[in-house]
Structures are given as C-alpha cells and as structure tokens.
Amino acid sequence: MRLSRATLPALSKNVAQPASSDAPVRRIVHLGIGAFHRAHQAVYTQDAMTPDDGWRITGVSLRSAQVRDTLAPQDGLYTVTERANGATSTRLITAIDTVLVAAEDPQAVIAALADAATRVVTLTVTEKGYYRHPASGALLTDDPAIANDLGGGVPRTIFGYLAAALELRRSTGAGGLTLVSCDNLSGNGALLMSLLTAFVDHRDPDLGAWVRAHVAAPDTMIDRIVPASTPAERASVAKAIGVDDAAAIVTEPFRQWVIEDRFAGPRPAWETAGAQIVDDVAPFELAKLRLLNASHSTLAYVGLQLGHGFVHEAIADPVLRAFVVAQMREEAVPSLTAAAGLDPDAYIDAILDRFANADLHHRLDQIAMDGSQKLPQRWIATVTDRLALGLDSPRHSLSLAAWIAYTADAPRISDDPLRDRFATIWAESADDPRQVVARFVTELGIFPAQFDDAIVDSLAQSVATWRAEGPRAALLAAVGEFDA
C-alpha cells in the first residue's frame, strides 16, 4: 500500500503527524528539490507552521522528473526517519504540496515564482548551479546556458527563471522576494545576489535597480547529513510504518540552520523550529566548511582509496581518524573566526560522533562528487589563509595530493564538471607527477596564485609517494611524521 492522503489511516501510530491547519497559505518555491531539502528546509518549515501562519512549498526540479514522479502518487507526502546508535523515530512531512519539472513546463515555474503568494525562494542547486568562475567568482556569461538565458531563450538556469519571474513581479506589483540559498558556498546569499544582479544588468539595467531595492538574499549555513536513499532502507521504513514510502528519507537527528537576519518580506518563523537568526553567519559557515565539510572530503578521497565505502567505516580506521582530527585541530581551527556560541572543540567532538553513527550509511563516493567545485572552499582557502600568515599546512597538502591521485581514475568519477580535464592531464602527463600537479594548479582555475613552485613541488612529491607506495603506507608515514 503506497503512502498517500487516502492511506493515512493505515500509517503506523508510531509515526508523528503534524496537526492540520486552515490558515491562509503563503508560499515558498524551492529550486533544486532533492533529498537534502526534504530532510532539512521542508522540516523546518513544517515545524514553523502554526494554526495562524500557513506556509507550503512548491518544489521545482530543474531537469529530472524523478522527484515529481515519486511524490505525486503520494500527494507530496513522505517520511523522515532519524537514526542514531539504534534509536529510531519517524515523522510524516506534509509541507510540500506541489512539484514542478522545469524542463517540462518552464512557464509554470516562472508563474509560481511570480505569484504574489510566493514570498520566499529557497535553493539547493549545488555549486554548479551558480555558473561562476571558480577563481574570480564572476558570472560565466559565456557559458552556453547563461548565454541562452541572457538572450531571452527558454530559461535553462536559475538566473533565467528568477529574472523572468522578477520582471513579472515588478510589472504586476507582486513585490519583492527573499532568496535563501542553502548551498555550501561561502557567503552564499551575497554570492547569489551578486550573480543575479550581474545577470539582470546584462538584460535590463532598470530591472537590476528594482532587484537591488526589492530582493534580499541572506547568507545561510545549513547542516544535516542526508545519505542517498537505498532500496534496503526504504524497505525497512515500509516495514516499520505500515505503508510503502518511495520517497522515504533516513537521516541523522542533528540538524542546523543559521540564517542572516535580512529578509524582503514575510517568512516562516523558522527560529521557532530551531533555526538561528543571526547578524553574521560567517563564523558559523567557516567552521562548518573547514571542519565538517573539509573532514568529509578527506574521509572520502583518502577513505575510498583505502577501501572504505562509508563514513562510519572511514572514521573507524584509527590512522585515518588520527589524521582527520589533527587536520581539524591543528590546521583548520586556528584559521576560524571567533564568535559567541561557537565552540570549535565541542563542534569537533560532535562531528566525530556524527561520523561514527553506523546507522547512517553515508557513502564516501557520494561525498566525493564535484570535488573541483567543493575543495576551493573546504581545503584550498584554509591553505591560502595560512600561507598569508607564513604557516604551512602539511595535512591539507596531503589531502590535496590524495584528491589529485583519486582523479587519475577520472573515467569512473561522475558529476564533476572538470572530469574530462582530469582525464586529459593524466593521459598526457601520468609519467611525471610534478607535471600533473603543475597542470592542476595552473589549468583548472581553482588554485590561487599563492600556490607557487614550492607548493607544487611538495604536492608532487606527495602524489608520487601516494601512487608508488599506496595510500595506507603514505598515510602511515605522514601520521608518524606529524606526530613526531
């Protein structure tokens, strides 16, 4: 029996269900609907609803119809199950009532964004969805998709959709919007606004002025580990709740959402659901990027080459755990910004506990996707900041070497926009590790000028050792050297 409104009476009494509400609906449009949004922002939004304040979400899949086709037979309903160390709890989520597929009906997406009832737009489109130069951060105006949207074609990017909708909102008097980026990007709100206004200025400078006056994009920091769903987990959930939920999500109990207090109009009272509304998100964001996200990447690129498949397996490897802890405590923490309510040591302890949760089958290959887009914020920025203070970063350098070695298997690496470039460099330069590293540093556009010949030489030696002696021998030698 499939989960739906008609089958709710069959749902196990152990599944927590929200109270019904007759409050007038105000709407959020979410661009890039996927598992993370459904486990994070949708949960916060549902928890923030009251009998007098009703919010509903229109989800938008920019390309694939998979999420829509999964949720539609269930009337948008799905469950979120939290698991940790044998403890389990499941709840029903009802906040999403519509899912659109932009590739099928772009005008429906524009209409939803332009609707006067829509006051907030949230986004999880990953780093690739921002079409920015990895080094300068500028909008890639010569990208074919952006060029299409600038030319007024059927939108293919978030900027094309937002610009079309904002023009309608201006002409109809629907008012401005709050755009809430929930992607792991430094200063994500400011970045989104700068790219959007750059795009709009190319198309219509008058609209650009209106956007600056009527649109807000607060910075945010989001955190919840949401592994990719598996058939086995969905079967386990179905057995527990009494109906089949094809959209079931299994995640950890921990969740965090820090949002800058800057909005263009009404919004859900997310703080009542546990979100932190703060004046400055930057210290929290920096800690997450350089501790949690950076460690995830280290576990992924090193752990996969050591033969581990999941985060809990990788962190249980004593040598890898010692390396990751030292990387966090000795190199990342000194690069953080102090802030009230931010305790790096306690945060690291919480991270390690979360990583060790064996009930959360978080695949390392999922974390390893899009490395070229993630590592500038997670590792390279830390190395650059430390270089400015005259400090080296041997652990981060070894992690970078592990990633470069990992890309040698580029034909099997999915979802990285530089995958073909990896393959070319390795095919042409595999016999010379220094040339491989030098080309990575100079040709990929993700390394800053501070990565000089001395750093290239050091990375090249680490890559050569990694490939010649094997990952475990290289890691053991490194841990011993650092401990000494």
Image: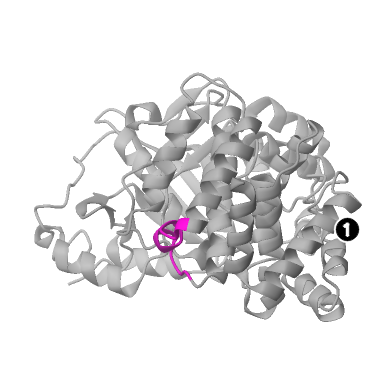
Residue 70 shown in magenta = no
Which residue is at 77% across, 42% downward?
A: 200
> Is label 1 in a helix, a strand or a loop?
helix
Residue 312 inside the magenta-drawn segment:
yes
Q: Which residue is mark 1?
A: 442
Crowd tier of the residue under label 1, counting other residues whose Cα lies within 10 Å: few below 14, some 14–19, many 20 or above: some
Of 365 and 278, nearer the camera is 365
Is residue 145 visible to the viewer in this orientation of the structure?
Answer: yes
Residue under the point 79% across and 38% down: 387
Location of the N terminus (image quadrant): bottom left
| Residue type at tag 1 | Thr
Query: Which span of residues is magenta-colored?
Result: 308-318
Question: Of 398 and 200, which appears nearest the observer?
Answer: 398
The residue sitting at 44% across, 27% down in the picture is 276
x and y percent of residue 106 in the render?
Answer: 59, 60
Q: Position of residue 47 (x, y in %)?
A: 30, 37
Q: How many marks?
A: 1
- Expressed as whole percent of the image width and height from the top left, the position of residue 161 reads 64, 51
User: Viewed as shown, does residue 229 lie left or right of 199?
Assistant: left
Question: Residue 28, image x and y in percent?
Answer: 46, 42
Q: Is residue 386 left or right of residue 350?
A: right
Looking at the image, residue 283 lies above or below residue 39: above
